[in-house]
Image (spheres, coloured by chain):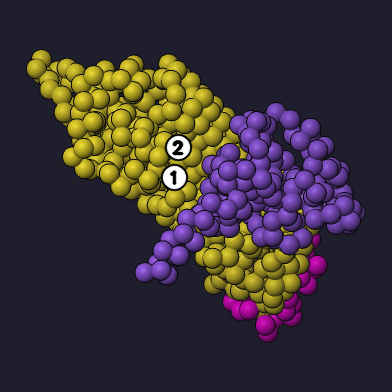
Chain colours: A purple, B yellow
Amino acid sequence: MKIIQLLVILVLFTACTVKPQPINYGSDVCHYCNMTIVDKQHASQMVTAKGKAFKYDAIECMVHSLQDEFKDTEMAHQLVADFYQPGELINATEASYLVSEQLQSPMGANLSAFKNTENGQKALEEFSGKIYTWKEIQEYLKL
Amino acid sequence: MWSKTITVCATCPVKSINEAILQAEEGDTVFVKKGIYKEANIKINKSIALIGENLPTIDGEKKGEIITIGTDNVTLDGFKIINVGVSYTTDYAAVRVVNSEGFVIKNLELEKLFFGIYLQKSNNGKVLNNKVRGEAVTEFNSGNAIHLWYCKNVEVRGNDVQRVRDGIYLEFSDEISIKDNFSKNNVRYGLHFMFSNNNYVINNVFETNGAGIALMFSKFMEVENNIIKKNWGTAAYGLLLKEVNDANIKNNLFFENTVGITVEGSNRLQYANNDFTSNGYAIKVKGACYENHVIDNNFLYNSFDISYNGRINNNKFNNNYWSNYTGYDLDKNGIGDVAYRPVKLFSYIVNRTPETIILMRSLFIDIIDFSEKVSPVFTPDDLMDENPRMKQIAHDRN
């Protein structure tokens, strides 16, 4: 009986922790544009301070969603996929962003993210384009 | 003309396709006999016809791209092409056409592929009767079967594409006609448009894809006579319309989809003569839609006919047949005397709190839906079909 009570409490508490959710590629849908999320190199996610997760198929969708409907919402996590490690989500605010004609992203902004400026620089040399920080990319994608 | 034919086979003087292309001159034909040719990076930079007899196989051995066409008026006909290389940074394709015109790609069978036929800034060509079999099931590193990027005036007809990411994908491509294709079991979409205008989608079948068709950020589309069925799942739609203007959606059959049509931010669309049969939702309108007309359709046995967010915004519903209509026709003119309100209160509740779907078909829900029907309080007062038909419309669907 004790164990069951403990389990119930445990379940209740785990449900409340504020953390990112795994993305089910091929069945989850982008919160902003309704597209099915399949691209592991460009997916992104935001989690509000209250723990509700929103998933996106592209970084540009997340940025637009942020400007559009979450202007005044406090976010606990802002995550973007690392281009060099598909499926891996990294902190969006620290990532380096590349807009390059060579790298097409799902929603047409040709935008990819990299773990740090070093990787971003490496990609810039490989694919050409222009590097942005998190702040700059929001300005660049302003609706 | 001094054009000649070069024959390639295991016992011929010319044993490899690459060699034959090297020898060929403008206007020649390279004729390949049955056999297996282990070649990749075949580059065609002359206007020749490369024709296979009895479906010879070109095995790329996962070394990257297999055939690249880089000049005008090339014909590629009758090959089986397998083992395209997979890469994260480069979109390798079985056949790629770059900056060319007048190409004809037909009767190919593609297997073990990443991207299938990739048209890049190429105009005035044809992609006919190709068969593509991908292996995308759990792996989402798959490419698209037929991919058009910045193309104009291309005919995509009679292709059969299965188990890839998107069956047919268009990005920045205009005046493309997509006819008589069959697209099934694709991970994402049967057909996918991004930023593409003036396109025709006629007589295709889209079955059990992640979603049937996705039209996004596009204008002036004709979607006619298509069968869109069995797109089931949490993120599944028959047809997804997002930011689409001036489109005609006519004479289509939407059968057993989670949502027949999801539409958002789309204006001046005509939905006419369609059948919406046994879907979860027939049409889900999400907002920012103006001047849309839903006329002369059949809504048959859907769990919800219409779901609506926000105001009616001069969208019109008229002259449809609704299997859920319970009115009467005293003057016997075939039109019900009481207007039909397609939005149920329960669909509002489900929109707000998806979990309440468990109450579906319970007596309580029937009661609140009935009372809402009698005196609407929550559902838009003016969202109704004033002339609901009493009889199903027999659409000509040859």
- Residue B342 vs A44, above or below: the answer is above
Callout 1: chain: B
Tell me the crowding category of disc 2: few under 14, some 14 to 19, or many 20 or more residues within 10 angstroms, Cα based: many
Q: Residue at x 45, y 17 (%)?
A: B313
Secondary structure at numbered mark 1: loop
Residue B20: say if magenta.
yes
Residue with the mark numbered 2? B262
Three-letter code, disc 1: Tyr
Q: Nearer the viewer, residue A66 or B217?
A: A66
Disc tally is 2
As drawn, is B98 to the left or to the right of B381?
right
The C terminus of chain B lies in quadrant: top left
Instruction: Name which quarter of the figure residue B343 lies in.
Output: top left
Q: Is residue B354 visible?
A: yes
Three-letter code, disc 2: Thr
- Write the start and end of the magenta stretch as one range: B10-36
Residue B202, numbered circle: none
Callout 2: chain: B
Q: Are marks 2 and 1 in contact (CB under 8 Å)?
A: yes
